[in-house]
Image (spheres, rainbow, N blue to C red):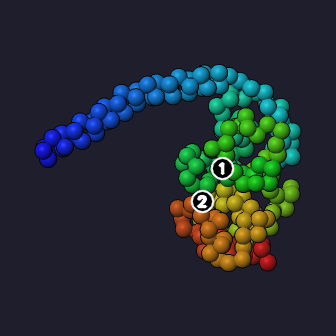
Amino acid sequence: MEKQKYSRRFFLSTSAMAATLAFIPVGVKAFYNNVKKLVIPLKEKMAIKLSINKAKYNLTVDTRTTLLDLVREQLDLTGTKKGCDHGQCGACTVHVNGQRVLSCLTLAATVQGKEVTTIEGLSQGSELHPMQQAFIECDGFQCGYCTPGQIMSAVGCVNEGHTHSVEEIKEFMSGNLCRCGAYNGIVQSIQKVAK
Ligand code: FES
Ligand code: FES
């Protein structure tokens, strides 16, 4: 009797599993077709207008181009750094309409009509931005590779008022990694500018 009950349950569970397995390839295929429909038309050039560091640009970009590649490869603004290219290190941080964004995860096509600021646009001519000056005075860097992204995030940290405590600063800056471990100097720089 017990054996019969077990067999029925076994039959039901294996049938459900088989039905699920049969369904997955159809779902995957439909998903693949949808992605194909979306991606193939995107393999095109597109005209965009935007402002970068207060200069107006009319550009033609491949719709797959990231903002990071646009500024570095097309416009030669190489201050913005490519670290991971996967949204994990913060080296590529720039501002779009005053908000910090990871330019490696931002398609250039999505900044149509917007104002982009890179590290090159922070200073006023030869006069450094207070955050740039603070990084120099507080030893906020060593090799400097992460520094443009750190500074762009640090400016956002002050502008958005996340400077009430060391913990709050660290939390806001946690997306910007520094392999040299210059974190103490970075926090001090932010505190200095926030005063
Ligand atoms: S290069 Fe964009 S987050 Fe690392
Ligand atoms: S200063 Fe070298 S990675 Fe940050």
Q: Which of 126 and 3 is in front in this view?
A: 3
Q: In this view, does 98 lie above or below 140?
A: above
Q: Which residue lies furthest to the front in this view?
A: 1
User: Could you say where residue 149 lies in the image, as x and y percent from the top left?
Assistant: 66, 56
Q: Nearer the viewer, residue 34 or 151?
A: 34
Name the residue carrying label 1: 102
Quadrant in the rendering for residue 189: bottom right
Tell me if label 1 and label 2 are in contact, CB under 8 Å. Answer: yes
Mark nearer the N terminus (1 vs 2) = 1
Residue 118 visible to the viewer: yes
User: Could you say where residue 157 lies in the image, as x and y percent from the top left?
Assistant: 72, 65
| Circle 2 crowding by C-alpha within 10 Å: few under 14, some 14–19, many from 20 | some
Name the residue carrying label 2: 175
Name the residue type under label 2: Gly
| 71 with respect to 170 (left or right) | right
Quadrant holding the C terminus:
bottom right
Mark linked to residue 161: none
The structure residue drawn at horizontal position 58% and vertical position 49%, both measured from the top left corner, is 87
Name the residue type under label 1: Leu
Separation of disc 1 and disc 2 at Cα?
10 Å
Q: Nearer the viewer, residue 53 or 7?
A: 7
User: Could you say where residue 128 lies in the image, as x and y percent from the top left?
Assistant: 81, 62
Residue 139 visible to the viewer: no
Name the secondary structure under disc 1. strand
Quadrant in the rendering for residue 168: bottom right
Whether the residue carrying mark 1 lies under 8 Å from ligand 1 is answered with yes
| 155 with respect to 175 (left or right) | right
